[in-house]
Amino acid sequence: MAVLNSISKTVVHERNIPNLLKTVLDILHREMGLLRGTFTLMHGDTLFIEASNGLTEEEMQRVTYKVGEGVTGKVASTGLPRVIPDISKDHEFLGKTKARKITKNVAFICVPVIHMEKVIGTLSIDHEVTEGVDLDRDLKLLETVANITAEAVAACLQEHEER
């Protein structure tokens, strides 16, 4: 519950999209002990990394996903979340950022960020799978965070367009 409380406070006060998304990822990292987190936003048929916790600026700028490409692109294309319990055993996982030093016992969860029934991006995390990690609980939390964030991003974009 502390995670959602912190995120809701951020969403209410932050109007800069990259700062908003980075702060949300920082909260998730701190509260959930994530290895890495990424928000992508859709521009046309391409997903760009808008914010990350665990990637360098160069890695963020270098990597894009076409809708339908890899796990992230498929989540954007279908609007359905994906949970990969162990990325070292999944052939669809592209690992385009090349940022992962360890892939064994690392789960990847990617959820769509949806506003007004349209996918506007994705939220994904890497989570080390240890005893006590509940991937279903993490999935539900990320879906809630994505829903809250979608509304904030849409409001920020609308404010920007009105200026």
Image (tube, rainbow, N blue to C red):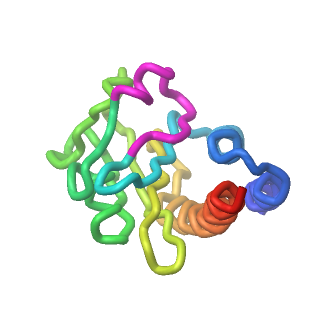
Residue 145: x and y in percent read: 62, 62
Instruction: Tell me the quadrant of the picture where the N terminus can be found.
Output: bottom right
At x 69%, y 40%, the residue is 19
Judge left or right: residue 54 versus residue 20: left
Q: Which residues are magenta?
A: 48-62
Residue 133: x and y in percent read: 52, 51
Judge left or right: residue 10 versus residue 84: right
| Residue 56: in magenta span | yes
Residue 17: x and y in percent read: 65, 47
At x 43%, y 74%, the residue is 118
| Residue 42: in magenta span | no
Residue 103: x and y in percent read: 32, 32
Residue 3 visible in the picture:
yes
Instruction: Tell me the quadrant of the picture where the C terminus can be found.
Output: bottom right
At x 46%, y 80%, the residue is 117
**The furthest residue to the front:** 163
Residue 130 visible in the picture:
no
At x 54%, y 36%, the residue is 52
Of residue 9 and residue 82, the one placed in the foreground of this image is 9
Compared with 31, 63 (above or below) is above
**The furthest residue to the left:** 91
Compared with 70, 120 (above or below) is below
State the count of labels: 0
Of residue 139 and residue 150, the one placed in the foreground of this image is 150
- Residue 161, by quadrant, is bottom right
